[in-house]
Each structure stands twice: as structure tokens, then as C-alpha cells.
Amino acid sequence: MAFAWTLALETGHPMIDAQHKELIKAVNDLLAACIQGNAADKVNSTVDFLLSYTKKHFGEEEQLQQQTNYPDIAHHKVLHAEFVKYVADLSAKLKEQGPSPILINNIIRGVGEWLVNHIQKEDVKVAAHAKKTSGG
Ligand SMILES: [Fe+2]
């Protein structure tokens, strides 16, 4: 099943939400390719996108945390770094082993579930703090 964009995933911060939508879309597009039998063609570009876009997104999110003196920034940065490593490990495995169905499934489930969980547990707090700090 695709990862549905629901209100529970909206942090209320336009930049963060727009970037999260891109990430969820990449996972869903890979899932759609799987269903159509084209996952092997799509998986390399998806993982490359995830590698570069997570770095951009995390960088901008951390900048926002810094600008607003988010109290939990150190912990949040650790979570981001762990996920960057997780995606890098998936990318290495993909290069070594090729696009096995198990690996493709791990990419879709692992990345999708991490994002949904991280957004709801952590990023909503970042956005709420940013809103409070900016006075609106
Ligand atoms: Fe985050």
C-alpha cells in the first residue's frame, strides 16, 4: 500500500511539508513501478534521489532549527545522520547485489515508515517551535 499524505503528516511549515511530500512521492513512485513490474529500472534513480534530497532537506530543516534555537537540535541531527547512513547502506547494497525484490521492499518500507514516523514524532515539534518563535 502506498504511503498516503494525510493531515497527520502536515507539520504546518510550508517548506518542510513541501519537501516531505517530495520524499513520500519518491517512495510511492517506486512502489507504483513495482506494481507495474518496472521496479528494477526505477530503483537506482529513486535511491540516488533519496541520497541527494534527504541531505538537502535535512540541511534546510536543521538550519531552521538553528535559526529558531530549537532545544532538541542535537538529538534531531543524530536521527537525520542515522537515516542518511541507512539510505547510503541501501545504496551500497543495491550496487553490490542488484535490485532484488527483498531489497526493493526494504527500500520502500524502510524509507517510507521512517519518514512517516519521524515526521509525526519529531518534525511536528520542530514546526510548532518555529511557529512559536516567529510569533505566529
Ligand atoms: Fe527531521
Image (cartoon, rainbow, N blue to C red):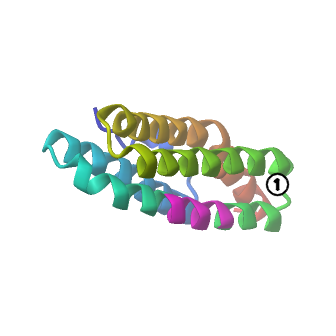
Residue 81 locus on image (x, y percent)? 70, 50
Residue 96 spot, x, y in % from top left:
44, 47
135 or 93: nearer the viewer: 93
Reply yes or no: does residue 56 show up in magenta: yes
- Asked which secondary structure carries label 1, the reply is loop
Q: On the rendered image, what quadrant is the C terminus found in?
A: bottom right
Occupied quadrant, residue 131:
bottom right
Where residue 132 sits, quadrant-wise, is bottom right
Q: Position of residue 37 (x, y in %)?
A: 14, 43
Drawn side of residue 43 relative to residue 116, left or right? left
Relative vertical location of residue 99 with respect to residue 1 in this rendering, above or below: below
Q: Nearer the viewer, residue 89 or 32?
A: 89
* View extreme (left): residue: 36
Residue 34 visible somewhere in the drawing: yes
Q: Amino acid at mark 1?
A: Tyr
The residue that label 1 is drawn on is 70
Q: Is residue 65 left or right of residue 90?
A: right
Q: Is residue 31 above or below residue 67?
A: above
Instruction: Determine whether, in the image, residue 86 is placed left or right of residue 105.
Output: right
User: What residue do we see at 44% from left, 54% from top?
Assistant: 23
Say if the magenta span includes residue 135: no
Residue at 41 percent across and 59 percent down: it is 22
Q: Is residue 14 shown to the viewer in this render?
A: no
Per the rendered image, the range of residues in magenta is: 51-59
Where residue 84 sits in the image (x, y, percent)? 62, 52
The quadrant of the picture occupied by the N terminus is top left
Residue at image point 44% right, 42% down: 7
Q: Is the stretch drawn in magenta largely helix, strand or loop? A: helix
The crowding category of the residue bearing disc 1, from other C-alpha atoms within 10 Å (few below 14, some 14 to 19, many at least 20), is some
